[in-house]
Image (cartoon, rainbow, N blue to C red):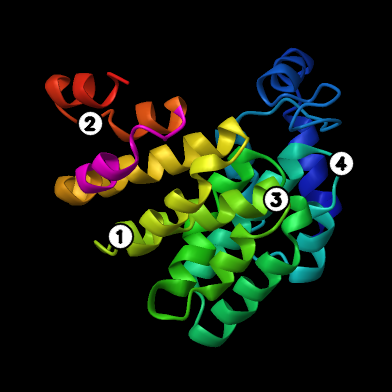
Amino acid sequence: MTAETVKQQLLAFGNPEKAKHATYFFKTGKGQYGEGDRFIGCTVPESRSVAKANKNLSFEELKKLLSDEYHECRFCALIILGEQFKKADIATRQKIFDFYLANTHGINNWDLVDVSAYTIAGEWLLDKDRSVLYQLAESENLWEQRIAVVSTMAFIRKNDLADVLKLSEKFLTHRHDLMHKACGWMLREAGKRDEKTLTGFLDKHYLNMPRTMLRYAIERLSPHQRKFYMRK
């Protein structure tokens, strides 16, 4: 199994029309967040099937995929890495986590973050010091900031909500809509576990929250509650 084998398998699924659509969907134009990214045009299920067929790929080969020009190669690498993490022992999980953080240059769009951050970084940090997330939050790299927030999904699923509140508060003034969406999404998930915690956060911040973050956060609340928080 090699990175080139994976790439050729993905290229076999290539669809020029889908690739063209992806360039618009993932904002690859000049000055946009995905500027310059290239696409093969294969679907997520197709990429997952390739990942499954190459699940034992080495770090060396995964690193090549994470540096590849094609988005789907990087996506496939992250799927493989996440599956390896699930089945790994503690020592190997540590290595996978370290490898993940050492290769964030290849985790450079929202779908790449969302498919890997909580399944690798979040899961690893469940019972460990989480200061690394706050270091990522201080990064000037949008995707590392998003990794910090989306990683909290793993904690939220264990009813551990402190970090998502802290990080969402930190990013209240963030300039990018993608961070507003990420924080709002995680806040919504937190609200599913503990609505009072969510409404407590909203009561404190809703007047100053970016509208996108607020709309995402309140999606699962009652119509009356949504109307209340959107009245500003």
Relative to 64, 133 lies left or right: left
What residue is shown at x 48% (from left), y 59% (from top)? 119
Which one is closest to the eye, mark 2 or mark 3? 2
What residue is shown at x 70% (from left), y 71% (from top)? 99
Kind of residue at badge 4: Glu
Mark 3: give few (<14), some (14-19) or many (20+) Cα within 10 Å: many
Q: Secondary structure at mark 1?
A: loop
Q: Secondary structure at mark 4?
A: loop
Using the image, determine if residue 188 lies above or below residue 90. Answer: above
If the image is split into quadrants, where does the C terminus sit? top left
**Residue annotated with mark 1:** 161
Precedes in sequence: disc 2 or disc 4: 4
**Residue annotated with mark 2:** 220
Precedes in sequence: disc 2 or disc 3: 3
- Cβ–Cβ under 8 Å for marks 4 and 1: no
Which one is closest to the eye, mark 4 or mark 3? 3
Q: Camera-side residue: 25 or 17? A: 25
**Residue annotated with mark 4:** 69
Gap in angstroms between the C-alphas marked 2 and 3: 29 Å
What residue is shown at x 56% (from left), y 87% (from top)? 91
In the image, the segment drawn in magenta is: 199-210
Precedes in sequence: disc 1 or disc 3: 3
The image position of residue 121, as x and y in percent, is: 53, 65
Relative to 120, 66 lies left or right: right
